[in-house]
Every structure is written in structure tokens, then in C-alpha cells.
Image (tube, rainbow, N blue to C red):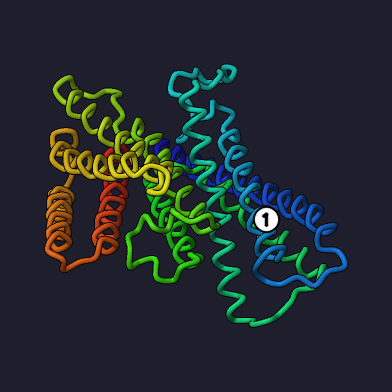
Amino acid sequence: MTGIRQRSTTRVAMRAAALDLEGAAIVVGAAALVVAAIVSLPFFWGRSLPIVGPGSVSQFTALAAGILAVAAYVVGRLWHRDALTPFGGRPDREPGSAPRSAPAVSVFDTAVIAVSHGMIALLGWLLLGAVLADGFADATVYALSATALAGAAAGVTAYAVFLSATRMDLMRLSTVLAVFAVVGILVATLTAPDPHWWQFHLSALGMTNSVSSLTFNLTLIVAGLMMAAIARYATDLTGVDASLRAATLRVRVCLILIGVLLAGVGLFPLDVSQILHNVSAVGMLIAFALLIFWVRPALPQAPRAFLLFGYLSFAVIVVAAVFFVTGYYVLTATELIAGVIVFAWVTVFLRVSGAGARA
């Protein structure tokens, strides 16, 4: 009977905590709605606004939602009243003790993940605005309606991001990374000034003085920093046997290299430095190849399917490279295949690592 009562008490406490969290998320969303509405009303007043384009509803909404998403993520991390760590409280804090200052690396990690949420919100609302503009051709939006839409979009965004921050772990972060990369690249391709960019190479998206290039390069930079930031948590050395420590460190180094070199691809477009751009791209693939063959001793508990997926991924990239060299594939197709495979494998790795940590 005592065990039953304890389990019942635990369930009640968990439900209460979940409801408290939902209540806090609603408050954060409502605050974001009010802030966005107050700021947007003077901007929209007396105007009929287009759905997309300069000075449009979607442009203002996306910017407001992106900024408030960053703030909501930081508030969500602080909700635990712990240091700004990406995935929860500090393990070295005694219950009831005062919060300690966060180490610089933890603040950096949290900042990168917060910015990624902000960019997902920014690009996501821009993308939705483009879709709605096609469905409501030549339509305009009155000031009060635009204010209500901007406020509602910001409120929903802040609500979702706050909950994401309070429940963040490797499993959820893998989804954030994948969504961020897909949305960023999709927006860049849809807004490219040259519709035939694909006839050259994927890097052509980052070579023009346009919003498309800015989006493409920022997506690569932030995704790379994000990957480098989470490498420490995906390869946690706490309690790791001495026999696994070296293998785990090799995996961590490879993940950091992939992230840094991916950021380098965006930081150095081809028209800025062809050498640094190519070195970053090729180096990222080399680090990925090493990671594929080094991950097994670092994750001995990983399912066989995950290991086979890695070897198959490496084989597909090699085949795609051969097809390009022989002239069967254009460079864009080869780059897309390699990029999708790298992101897919890293996403699955984060999920496998997160599942292993939960076990």
C-alpha cells in the first residue's frame, strides 16, 4: 500500500508540475502577443499592407516572432532557476542552494540554440507568408487585422519555444537542428534571384548580394555552431570507462570539426574565398568519414541498424562523388546528397546518443 501511495503522490506531483509549466508558457505567450501588438500597431496604423514583400505583414511578423523566440528560449532556460545550460540544471548544485553563475561555454551553447529557435521562427513565418500570398493573390491586410495577426503569431511562437526550452534534451535538439536546416535551405532556394542556380552548384546560393544568400550562409553558420556546441553533450564523458574515453573524445572532436567546418562553408562563400570554402567543405566530409568508422567503439550500446546506416551513408556519398566525376551527376546533386546524408546521420546520432543517456 505504501508503494501505491508513493506512486500516486508522484503522479500527482508530476501532473501539477506539468500544469504549472503550461501555465507559465501561456503567460509567456500572452506577454509576447501584447508586446508584438503594441510595437506593430504604430507601424501598421493607417496602412493597407501586402502579405509579403518589403514592409509587409509577414516580414514584420517574422522579425517580431524571431526576436521574441530568442527571448522566450532564454526565459525557458531560466525557468529552472539554474545556470544557463542547454539541457537542464547543473549536476553540481545542491538542492536549495543559490544558483551559481553559468560557465562561458554553457552560456554560449544556450545562446546558439536560442538563436536557432529565433531563426526557425523568422524563416518559418516568412515561408508561411509566401504560401499565403500565393493563395490570396493581390490581397492586402488592414492595420488592426495585421496587428492581431502579428500578435497571435508572436504569442504562439513564444509559447512553443518556451516549452521547447524547458524540455530540451538531445532527442528534441536533433529535431530542432533538422528543422532549422531544412527551413533555412528551403527559404534560400525559394528566394534565390536566379531560378537556375542549381545548374552551377549548391554554393551558388550564397554568392549573391540578396536575402537568399544571407539566409543560406546564416543557416550554415548557425547550424555549424549549433552542432559544435552540442558535441559536448552528445559525447558526455561523465561516468565513461577509461577504455571508452579515448573513443568518445575522438567522436567529440569529429563532431566539433564538422560543425566548425560547416560554419566555415557559410562564412567563406565561393566569391569571398574559394580556397577556404573548398577546404571547409572537403574537410567536413573527411571528418564525417572518420566519424562513421570511429563511432562504434564510442557507442557500444548503439543498435546494429545505426551502424549499418552509417556505413551505407558513407557508401552513398562515395557513389555520388563517382557519378559526378564521370559526368553523370551535376555538382549540385552531389552536394545535396552529401549534405542531406550528413545532416540525417548527425540527427540520428543525436537521437541514439540521447536514447542511450536515458536508458
The residue closer to the viewer here, 251 or 84, is 251
Instruction: Name which quarter of the figure residue 210 lies in.
Output: bottom right
Image point 50% across, 40% down: which residue?
9
- On the question of residue 340 being in view, the answer is yes
Quadrant of res 142: bottom right
In the picture shown, does residue 294 fall above or below 66?
above
Residue occupying the point 68% across, 63% down: 54
* Residue 195 in the image: above or below residue 109: below
How many numbered marks are there?
1
Is residue 172 shown to the viewer in this render?
no
Residue 219: percent from left, percent from top: 45, 50
Q: Is 91 situated left or right of 280 in this image?
A: right
- What amino acid type is highlighted by mark number 1? Gly
User: In which quadrant is the C terminus drawn?
Assistant: top left
Residue wearing tag 1: 155
Instruction: Report the front residue among 10 and 157.
Output: 157
- Residue appearing at x 25%, y 50% in the figure: 345
Residue 130 lies, in percent from the top left, at 57, 71
- Between 16 and 152, which is closer to the camera in this rendering? 152
